[in-house]
Image: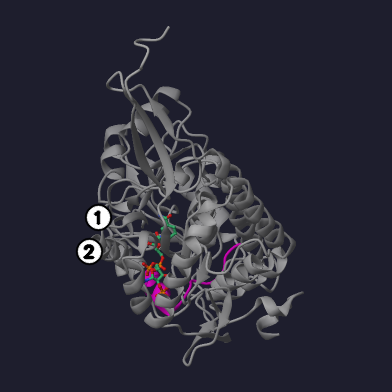
Amino acid sequence: MLDGLDLARPELLSGQSLIDGAWTDCERVIPVINPATGRKIGDVGDCGAHDAERAVAAASRALPGWRAIAPRTRQAALLRWRELILANAEDLARILTAEQGKPLVEARGEIHYAASFLEWFAEEAKRAYGDIIPGHQPDKRLLVLREPVGVVGAITPWNFPAAMITRKVGPALAVGCTMVLKPSELTPYTALALARLAVESALIPPGVFNVVVGEAEPIGAVLTQDPRVRKFSFTGSTAVGKMLGARCMSTVKRVSLELGGNAPFIVFDDADLGQAVEGAIASKFRNTGQTCVCANRLLVQSGVYSAFAEHLAERVSELAVGDGLKGQMDQGPLINEAALRKVERHVEDARAGGASALTGGHALPGEGCFYAPTVLVDVAPDALLCREETFGPVAGLVRFETEAEAIGLANEGTAGLASYLYTRDLDRAFRVTEALRYGMVGVNTGLISTEVAPFGGVRESGLGREGARQGLDDYLDYKLMCLGLAPDPGGRSG
Ligand code: NAP
């Protein structure tokens, strides 16, 4: 087995896409690279537009049967799939680490997080309630029904190769939709292993869940423009999401977008510094800084600036960096060379603006795309690091004096996904939370994601919410039944 993968079930590492319940080979292949070593894990089939169309046709055929069955039957299917994921969690985690790079302990956590969405939405399957509204006229009765939107096209990124999938397919299948998924070609093996387990569950019929791996553009064109696809759900960068969302308007699809962030992490003078440092480590350095909710700019009030910076640098310098499959690591590689270059560019730019590194500040020599975990001080608020997602293990610290200044800095830009603040003043916690133009605010915590709470952004960070009861809404349409009653033959009864 390549790269020390050492799987209990080697057949879970397969490069075939799943279309209409059948494993599909392609003429061309895409190599999948382990970012920790730069070596190839294997080749996956490169599906094209034709395969995507076949998958959409299969999802359309499967739709009437799947939506017609009782919610509790769909619930049983999702729960069976979840059981299989948990039973194979170690293999899934190893595949995930091999192709994505996150330390094994984080990969294991992601597999459990991914499974949690199937459990949550299996439960919610029975709760897609409608409404009964008092009639607007004496002979009218108004019923609002909830119905599945239909075939869903979904595109997911490489940074959470399992959880971003189940966060979409869980609610979709729970309410009776069918799906065609295109995972990132950088991390297709995890998606295909999940698909193998869905088939193994024997409760998800052919065509209900299809996974089409391949070059993004042709498959994306089908998922955004085929009229049979009635909803498009995307997680990825803001630029690509805007472009694909706009394409969906040619057939007026329902659109959900989970896009990029630029999270401010505010530490006030009255914060518990130990808690703030641990929160910064959790938020900034999870997945080596490659999450959409990672703290991107750390705004620290002048009274605690030096103490916070020193304490953080000390902790960051202790982080173990390396191949997640080989020993206990805290940090893995960046996903590829381009990501490494972007981090280098951001650090150079910050240095040119007056910043200096308390620890790190350079790429690591040797194989793989590793960058030393870094703390930069005296970062200018207009540095690239503060304006764009760095997506790497670099904590850039900006100094501020007043609460109003911190809110102003935090709200700069167009992103509105996650934000964080640390204070022991309850009034300030509410005041600042209400002033932040973000979809999510972590107060005295750096970890905010759970399947039971609505995840999503405002401004240019997205449309819609995933997880929680709100996560069902994006996969359901409303249908009004306006019932006209015949006149009461006996006059007004009662
Ligand atoms: P990306 O480049 O936008 O890619 C995301 C997905 O879109 C991948 O499957 C990619 O395919 C596909 N794609 C790219 N160009 C496409 C095109 N022209 N047509 C159709 N599909 C296309 O983003 P990424 O670099 O993978 O992911 C990182 C970004 O995702 C960050 O901005 C992060 O903040 C964001 N993100 C947001 C959330 C959230 O919930 N808000 C969660 C996770 C990540 P290939 O990879 O195969 O090219």
Residue positioned 28% across, 52% down in the render: 460
Name the residue nearer the viewer: 442 or 76.
76
Residue positioned 25% across, 51% down in the render: 413
- Assess whether residue 342 is covered by the magenta stretch: yes
Q: CA distance from mark 2 to mark 1?
A: 38 Å
Dot 2 falls on a residue whose secondary structure is helix
473 with respect to 453 (left or right):
left
Q: Quadrant of the N terminus?
A: bottom right
463 with respect to 446 (left or right):
left
Residue 382's disc is: 1
Vertical relation: 162 (above or below) 311: below
Q: Which residue is mark 2?
A: 250
Q: Quadrant of the C terminus?
A: top left
Dot 1 falls on a residue whose secondary structure is loop
Residue positioned 51% across, 61% down in the render: 165
Vertical relation: 10 (above or below) 244: below
Near mark 1 (Cα within 10 A), the count class, few <14, some 14-19 or many ≥20, is: few
Residue positioned 48% across, 43% down in the render: 307
Visible in this render: residue 322? no
The quarter of the picture where residue 218 lies is bottom left
The single residue placed furthest to the right in the displayed view is 8
Task: Compare marks 2 and 1 and give the one earlier in the sequence.
Answer: 2
Vertical relation: 77 (above or below) 239: above
Residue 237 at x, y percent in the picture: 35, 63
Residue range of the region highlighted in magenta in the rendering: 330-344
Figure disc tally: 2
**Residue type at the position of mark 2:** Ser
Residue 276 at x, y percent in the picture: 51, 41
Residue 359 at x, y percent in the picture: 49, 62
